[in-house]
Amino acid sequence: MENEEDIVKTTCEIMVQKVLPAIRAEIARIIISEHGRTQQEAAEVLDLSRAAVSQYLSAKRGADVDFSGETRDEIRKFTAELLAGLSSRDQVQGMCGVCKYVQKSGWLDKNEPDAGFCVICGENED
């Protein structure tokens, strides 16, 4: 039987388990601290419960990733777009854009070197 440490997670597993919660946590923090909104408003923007936002803010969720300043700026831009109002499709595309940015920023290479770049997103895509 394989040792759990020997199993390589796919890029998507890593992104879903670690990075996307951290992105949501950062978005919630930005909505509240930089835009003066409430936890309930952040929850509505992110389509989450207020309790989930509270867990993001208290680092019970999404605290496994330390983003670079450039990545935080990218998340900040996306947050402003979310607050301005986006269609569901544009919200998904925006979150995918942030996810791609994190991958291209070198976070995966540094923190999960065996994962590689997502084959769906395309390594050579701009």
Image (cartoon, rainbow, N blue to C red):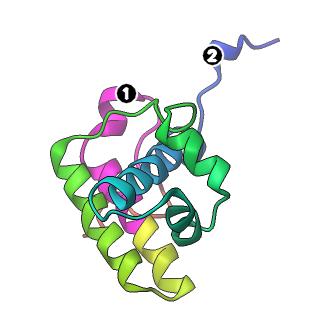
Q: Which residue is mark 2?
A: 6
Q: Which residues are magenta?
A: 96-118
Residue drawn at x 45%, y 66% as measured from the top left: 95
The amino acid type found where label 1 is placed reads Asn
Q: Nearer the viewer, residue 61 or 95?
A: 61
Residue 123 position in % (x across, y down): 34, 58
**Does the magenta portion include 103?**
yes
Q: In front: 94, or 28?
A: 28
The correct choice, above or below, for 3 with respect to 67 in the image is: above
Q: Residue furthest left?
A: 70
Q: Examine the rendered structure and indicate whether residue 70 appears above or below residue 43.
A: above
**Residue 76: x and y, percent?**
27, 61
- Where does the C terminus fall, quadrant-wise? bottom left
- Quadrant housing residue 116: top left
Secondary structure under badge 1? helix
Q: Main secondary structure of the magenta part?
A: helix
